[in-house]
Amino acid sequence: MQYCAKIKDLSVSFHGRKAISNISTELPSCGITVLLGRSGSGKTTFLRSLNRLNEIIEGYEGSGNVNLFLGGRSRDIYSDDAPEPTELRRRVGMVFQTPNPLPMSIRRNIILPLSLIPGSKKTENEERMESVLKTTGLWDEVKDRLDTPAGRLSGGQQQRLCLARILALEPEILLLDEPTASLDRRASEVIEKHLLSLKNKYCIVMISHSVRQALKLGSHFIFLRGGNIVASFSKGELPEGKEAENLFNDLL
Amino acid sequence: MAALFVFITVYALDGLIKSPASLLGSIWNPEGKEFGILPMIWASAILSLSASVIGWVFALGCSCFIHGYGSKRLARILSNVLRIMTAIPTVVYGFASVFLLVPLIRNGFGGSGFSWLTASIVLSLMILPTMVLAMDSAFRTIESETEITSAALGLTKEQNLALVVLPTSKKWILSSALLGFGRASGDTLIPTMLAGNAVQYAISPLDAMRTLTAHIGLVLSSDVGGTAYYSLFVAGGILLFVSVTANIIFRMIRGRSHE
Ligand SMILES: Nc1ncnc2c1ncn2[C@@H]1O[C@H](COP(=O)(O)OP(=O)(O)OP(=O)(O)O)[C@@H](O)[C@H]1O
Ligand SMILES: [Mg+2]
């Protein structure tokens, strides 16, 4: 099996309190890896350690290795050989648990990060914006108010905008922190369908609170509890039907 | 407050109606019954403008330095210095400048050293902390809201400041200029101590000048009587009008930004 990430002895603490401790695992490069666990179990912290985002949080301390498969080769992102954090974060895109549009227009939310990539062209950026807004099902809702503040969108619309914004950067690895938490069933289904269509193109790591969603989308499952991995499965190892759901519920 | 407003306005208008030519002339010569305050209006206008422009530019520089362009340690030192500066009484600025800055200007550029330039520099220094604190609090709020998001999108701290924080706090940056202008136009001590107090149209930065505020202070503390007081009411009325206008614009800018 091919891996998009190898994690060894990863520990992260904030202000001296351990958030995750000694995690070692491997994430397959194809399909969707779903992280599950109770609130506070370290899921978000784990995701953030894959794009070095923990580092800008006050009180951060971390140790261990994270090797990501980027641009055709494996690189230890915490070593000197690693790409700059800014470049790394473009290539390992993350969507947050709560929608976080920047305080500017819808258009600029997508165009601004794109325009900072060296060599990017204005017309291409505009095209890309349209195409990602279409894939997240947002285009028809916002096409005639692209220049209004993104904060005026509904929560679910904002969440889709944030997903679109990351997709526009065409990352190699996609980190999604409960991407459908603020969406209704219909909107969730649109996103879920889209994630399934992306799963062969990107390595996707997502957090989900819903066992049903996890089973529907995931091909690899990791359970966290108190900052440790307590179990991990690939789809093939799971029992059939209802039993898998029960197993998951027991682990949570 | 309203009573004060009415009181000053009535007397100022009364004075203006009784002797408009003399009050709005260019010559201040109480013995000759000439009470022109135009040079003082000019002096107040250019001094508070120059001081707030200089102060604003440096305040913006300081705020950017504190929020990303400077090292963490230097940034902390700078904000502590600014905080201490707010606690220094104005008279200390004036006093220190008479002995430090005035000779420097006299020797460096000529003239008496008591000039538009001297007063501008000290006045801008005096209003600097207020402006920085106003900008700083806006920057801090917006930065804490956008820092992680921007980082996750591949922006550096500097890019976040320049492309996200600054544009978002445009209204606070502008309104802090008005805040500084308001303080600069109302200050009496600095221009009295450092601007030379000559009644003339200052053109060169090295010219001496007398502002409206200094004028009121000086006339009240000397014993010119009678009609001269009318000119004080007009001067006071103008100052009041300017500060109220600045305040209204300030509120309008701030108010809109709540949207
Ligand atoms: N920004 C932060 N500053 C300080 N401590 C933090 C921060 N973020 C997380 N932590 C700590 O790290 C631990 C794990 O938090 P994390 O956010 O990773 O949990 P989670 O599994 O994502 O929970 P949830 O499902 O509620 O989002 C918690 O104890 C939390 O207090
Ligand atoms: Mg979380």
Image (cartoon, rainbow, N blue to C red):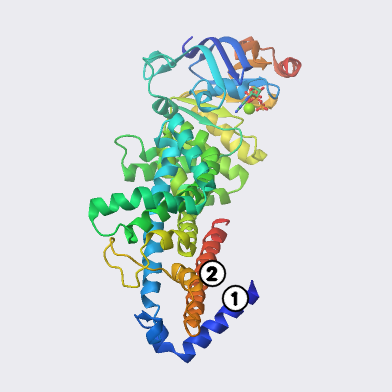
Q: Nearer the viewer, residue A126 or B201?
A: B201
Vertically, is A28 above or below A44? above
Instruction: Decide: is A9 above or below B115.
Output: above
Given this view, does label 2 or label 1 mark the residue nearer the observer?
1
Residue A42 appears at what percent x and percent y?
63, 20
Query: Amino acid type of disc 1?
Result: Phe
Q: Any mark on residue B94, and which?
A: none
Secondary-structure class at tag 2: helix
Q: In the image, residue B104 lies at what x, y percent?
A: 29, 49
Give ligand 1's quarter of the image: top right
Q: Mark 1 points at which residue?
A: B5
| Residue A157 seen in this snapshot | yes
Q: Can residue A147 be seen in this view?
A: no
Q: In this view, does A114 lie to the left or right of A156?
A: left
Q: Do the residues labelled 2 and 1 touch (CB within 8 Å)?
A: yes
Q: Residues within 10 Å of mark 1 (few under 14, many from 20)?
A: few
- The three-letter code of the residue at mark 2 reads Val
Q: Front-most of B252 and B247?
A: B247
Quadrant of image for the C terminus of chain A: top right
Query: Residue B180: x, y in percent?
Result: 47, 57
Q: Quadrant of residue B145?
A: top right
Query: What residue would you read off at disc 2?
Result: B244
Q: How far apart are marks 2 and 1 (CA)?
A: 10 Å
Count residues near mark 2 (Cα–Cα under 10 Å), then give few for <14, some for 14-19, many for 20+.
few
The answer for which chain carries disc 2 is B
**Chain to which the residue tagged by mark 1 belongs:** B
